[in-house]
Image: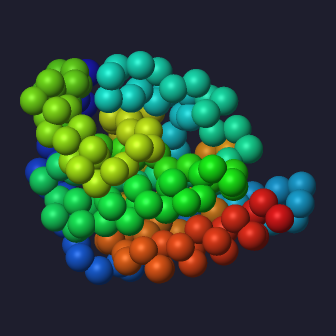
Amino acid sequence: MKKQVLTFLAIPFLLSSCGTSIIKPFSSSTSKVKTSSAGKQHFKAINVSLDDCIDLNGDKLDKSYFAGKLTLINVWGTYCGPCKEEMPALGYLYNKFSKDFPFQILGLVIDVQDDQGNIDPTQKTKAERLLNTAKCTYQNIVITPSWYSWINTIQYVPTSVFIDDTGYSVAEEIIGSMPTSKWESYIEGFLFDYFD
């Protein structure tokens, strides 16, 4: 277990930041296409449990948090310049879309835990300051065991993925930061396609 925790905690130091966005193609060995009852394709790009989400205060998120919503999961680190640069845009978009549409953002901050997997108070404070400064009022979680396998596939931060309320992604991962207008068009497109 300790080896697994140490491997997981080394991730923030191995990940590099990138300033431009690219779309990561699915690996045929890790993705499966599922067709919903509405005939829409969903891709299994991430293997996580929506029941295994812990916020920055150590509180568990209930699976109902995801019910009926398109969720943008944004993986970020407090050390990552591009992550910090795009946070105000994400905060703005969360406020713009979440009030009137079935949409939310979930931040996954990768560097607030110590080598035992406990939330480090100093790093937590740093993350909370960054979120407050950027006016990001959306929920942020930390890495838990069911998220290890997906996090280990991420090579850069920020990395983002849109998932439906069953945990299936609706598109490829987005690697890197994007301007507000590009995020806006992605969100509008996915809302139209999946929640029309």
Image coordinates of residue 85 in percent, x first then y, are 24, 66
Instruction: Tell me if residue 151 can be seen.
Output: no
In the picture, which quadrant includes the N terminus? top left
Q: How many marks?
A: 0
Instruction: Tell me if residue 140 can be seen.
Output: yes
Q: Nearer the viewer, residue 149 or 83?
A: 83
Q: Nearer the viewer, residue 16 or 64?
A: 64
Residue at image coords 75%, 70%: 193
Toward which corner of the image does residue 24 lie, by quadrant? bottom left
Image coordinates of residue 75 in percent, x first then y, are 35, 53
Q: Nearer the viewer, residue 6 or 139?
A: 139
User: Is 4 on the left or on the right of 149, as rendered?
Assistant: left
In the picture, which quadrant includes the C terminus? bottom right
Toward which corner of the image does residue 156 lie, by quadrant? bottom left
Toward which corner of the image does residue 122 lie, by quadrant? top left
User: Is 100 on the left or on the right of 110, as rendered?
Assistant: right
Image coordinates of residue 99 in percent, x first then y, are 63, 50
Residue at image coords 66%, 74%: 189
Residue at image coords 34%, 51%: 135
Image coordinates of residue 25 in percent, x first then y, are 48, 74
Residue at image coords 37%, 75%: 178
Q: How is the image coloured?
A: rainbow
Question: Looking at the image, is 122 positioned above or below residue 166?
Answer: above
Q: Nearer the viewer, residue 171 or 186?
A: 186
